[in-house]
Image (tube, grey):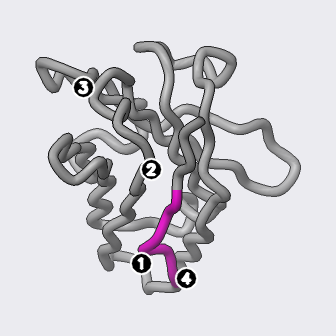
Amino acid sequence: QVRLVESGGGSVQAGGSLRLSCEASGRTFSYYTVGWFRQTPGKDREFVARISPSDGATTSTDSIQGRFAISRDNAKNTGYLQMNSLKPEDTGVYYCALGSYSVRSESYTYWGQGTQVTVSS
């Protein structure tokens, strides 16, 4: 069993930055893709970014390209989402997950509890 603990959310003004962290328990973190998803009220959970377990290949949704960066440190069992130039539409609950290299939430097995990000204009 893998447990994910997220941190780093908060409230910022538009243009600000936050860094989300996702620390995993267990020794299998390096086997999995790390994915970040977000959910806003009334909308389905949407894919934000993913990073492969070995070669560090990444994919991100168009709306965050050039502003967000996903990374991981397998030695620390931790994934990161650096968010810069935040916009009000980035507001939501951000979830990290471990699973297969996919943009679909169904492909991820383990999920964090979510962390709130609020961006004010």
The N terminus lies in quadrant: top right
Tag 4 or tag 1, which sits nearer the N-term? 1
Q: Nearer the viewer, mark 3 or mark 4?
A: 3
Query: Closer to the camera, 76 or 89?
Result: 76
Q: Nearer the viewer, mark 1 or mark 2?
A: 2
Tag 2 or tag 4, which sits nearer the N-term? 2
Tag 3 or tag 2, which sits nearer the N-term? 2
Q: Are marks 1 and 4 in contact (CB under 8 Å)?
A: yes
- Label of residue 96 in the image: none
Residue 106 is situated, as x and y percent measured from the top left of the image, at 68, 18
Q: Which residue is mark 2?
A: 25
| Real-space Cα separation, disc 4 to disc 2, in angstroms | 33 Å
- Label of residue 14 in the image: 1
| Real-space Cα separation, disc 3 to disc 4, in angstroms | 28 Å
The magenta region covers: 5-10
Q: Amino acid at mark 3?
A: Thr
Residue 61 is situated, as x and y percent measured from the top left of the image, at 42, 30
Which quadrant of the figure has residue 62? top left
Q: Amino acid at mark 1?
A: Ala
Q: Which residue is mark 3?
A: 58
Residue 88 is situated, as x and y percent measured from the top left of the image, at 54, 69
| Real-space Cα separation, disc 3 to disc 1, in angstroms | 25 Å
Q: Which residue is mark 4?
A: 120
